[in-house]
Image: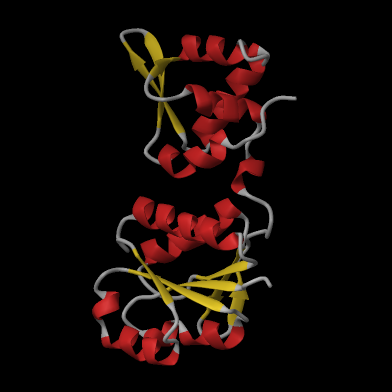
Amino acid sequence: MALRTLIATMGFDERHVLPSLRLMPYDRLVLVAGRETFRSAGFRRLKVLEPGLRTVRVDPFDLTDALESIRGTIRRAVGDGPVRISASGGTKILTNAAILAAFQEGIEAWYCDPDPVRLPVLRGVSLAAAFSPAEGAVAHALHGPIGHDHLVTAVAARGFARRTVLGAIRSLAAKGLVELDRDDGTVLVRPSPRFALFRDQLRAVPKKA
């Protein structure tokens, strides 16, 4: 029998979580929050209402840490049944991480405070669908700063036209995922700070047929 999992973010006030518990059907509740939340009176009150809830501790001020933890939680839960996220409580960084994780993994995301608002995430459509095979090939080849011409040649060797590779690099730069710098006359391509947040999706893009 499938288990419906609700992943909810929380700060110090359980009142930001309670509307989602009333409105979202679930069999298993997973609470994502920082260490101080789990020491708070709000968490203790919520634990009385939901003694079987599970917890995932994250740094609510570190987007990468929260994102990776929530994505891991989603991936473990989807094998048991449908998963929803309620990004209604906690720091702005934590709620943004929850929404981004839902977008990357293709699950429903909601904001319930107090009325439910479904966020613009398409269930079953992962972020990998937003990137072309050439962009995925560039990401596979990009592990650090690399000469622009060398990168183009390496990706073109995988069966892509040079103009397609050039367009993919420009597209990734426009999305803020790679940076182009000039060093002693050589143009270097390097991963941007945001690249790490999307690395898995970029490298999951289907290869060129």
Label total for image: 0
Image point 58% across, 84% down: which residue? 115
Quadrant location of residue 188?
Answer: top left
Quadrant location of residue 59?
Answer: bottom left
Residue 64 location, x and y as percent? 37, 50
The answer to whether 89 appears left or right of 126 in the picture is: left
Residue 28 location, x and y as percent? 53, 76
Tell me how the rendering is colored: secondary structure
Image point 68% across, 60% down: which residue? 123
Image point 63% across, 12% down: which residue? 162
Question: Which sits in the foreground, 200 or 132?
Answer: 200
Residue 136 location, x and y as percent? 58, 30
Quadrant location of residue 27?
Answer: bottom right
The C terminus - image quarter: top right
Residue 139 location, x and y as percent? 51, 28
Question: Which sits in the foreground, 53 or 117?
Answer: 53
The extreme front residue here reads 1
The N terminus - image quarter: bottom right
The answer to whether 61 appears left or right of 3 in the picture is: left
The answer to whether 14 appears left or right of 120 in the picture is: left
Image point 30% across, 68% down: which residue? 34
Q: Please, is residue 111 above or below residue 192 in the view?
A: below
The answer to whether 22 appears left or right of 195 in the picture is: right
